[in-house]
Image: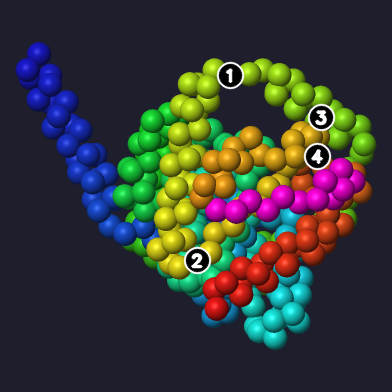
Amino acid sequence: MKKLIKNSVLFSLPFITGIVVLFSFPLDKDFAYHFVKGECDNKASWMYHRIFEDERPVDIVFSGASQTGSAFMDQFISEELNSITDQNIEVVNYGYCRRGRDIQYVMLKDLLDQKHPKILVVEVAEDEPKKSHPVFPYLAESKDLFGALIFFNQRYFTSIWKGIAVRFEALRNKITGGNRVIADNQYPDFGHRPSSNVVDEAVIKENSARWHRRLNKQKLQLVRDIELNYSKHYLKRIAQLANKNQCTLLFVYLPESGSNLKEPLLETYYELIAPVIILPEELINDSANWKDATHFNDSGATAASKFIVPFLEDALHSTE
């Protein structure tokens, strides 16, 4: 038995050593952001360019999921603020597909370190996501990856494995002298995802029925508290990141078309961290503003962008 254990340890030692070595080196951000291909119209590669290569500053950043990506026209908002303030305000829509506070944290960490924006607007939905974002381990630095061992992180060990995979591929690419593949994306200068589609009314009704069933399935508060722990952990870290960089934090509520929730379920919690901007009901209730059940089309994005400009103007004044 002892011999078997000894042989197993000796057999495993090279693999363990290799993993330790992989995580001891800094994450190759260039490789990592471009490693995530075919995801969100390859927006991660555009994000890398906007953070590390594009010399333009970032004054205001919107962070969230694809709902943010569809809701705020960063070019339009930039032009509106420039005409109002007589300044050169650069706005960036950093919405990345699928919800997950951990992916937003690691992306914002890079952005705030490089660009030092004045205002950060973070999307909130009806409720907080309960799981880690599947792309998080590809972009997370080693300390953030291992530090994600938060109670009720269901994807922790999967994330560690993905972290090993991206670091191994980056090392192999460096050894073989491979060239970075520039993935095509639909974001030449700004991060808004345009769409002229208009949703069918039946889709909104179907989504409304789903939300009705979901809201009627009440969970025990203890269970909810456990499930929300992961997202709340990263919301606090995002708030700390903004505070450290003297960046004003705002929340903006982006509900789905059929939820009929006028405020997020955790509004009281959010208000303890930062103000929550609520879009007008008429904007939300107008089916002409939706491309599907969960995302605005260009009509909705124009209305949402116009509505939020005065809030940003006030926030800019407070930073002067």
* Cα gap from disc 4 to disc 3, whole angstroms: 7 Å
Q: Which residue is mark 2?
A: 247
25 falls in the magenta region: no
Q: Secondary structure at mark 2?
A: loop
Dot 4 and dot 3 residues touching (CB under 8 Å) = yes
Q: Nearer the viewer, residue 19 or 99?
A: 99
Q: Quadrant of residue 74?
A: bottom right
In the rendered view of the protein, which quadrant contains the C terminus?
Answer: bottom right
Q: Quadrant of residue 98?
A: top right
Boundaries of the magenta span = 274-286
Say which amino acid is labelled 2. Answer: Cys
- Name the mark nearer the viewer: 2 or 3: 2
* Cα gap from disc 2 to disc 3, whole angstroms: 36 Å
Q: Which mark is residue 219?
A: 1
In the rendered image, residue 75, in percent from the top left (x then y), is placed at 73, 71
**Colour pattern:** rainbow
Task: State whether residue 172 is above or below residue 312.
Answer: above
Residue drawn at (78%, 57%), measured in percent from left and top?
Answer: 304
Q: Earlier in the sequence, mark 1 or mark 2?
A: 1
Dot 4 and dot 2 residues touching (CB under 8 Å) = no
Dot 1 and dot 4 residues touching (CB under 8 Å) = no
Task: State whether residue 267 is above or below residue 220.
Answer: below
Q: Earlier in the sequence, mark 2 or mark 3?
A: 3
Task: State whether residue 117 is above or below residue 253.
Answer: below
Q: Which residue is mark 3?
A: 208
Say which amino acid is labelled 1. Answer: Lys
Q: Quadrant of residue 29?
A: bottom left
Dot 2 and dot 3 residues touching (CB under 8 Å) = no
In the rendered image, residue 46, in percent from the top left (x then y), is placed at 59, 64
Q: Which mark is residue 257?
A: 4
Q: Earlier in the sequence, mark 4 or mark 2?
A: 2
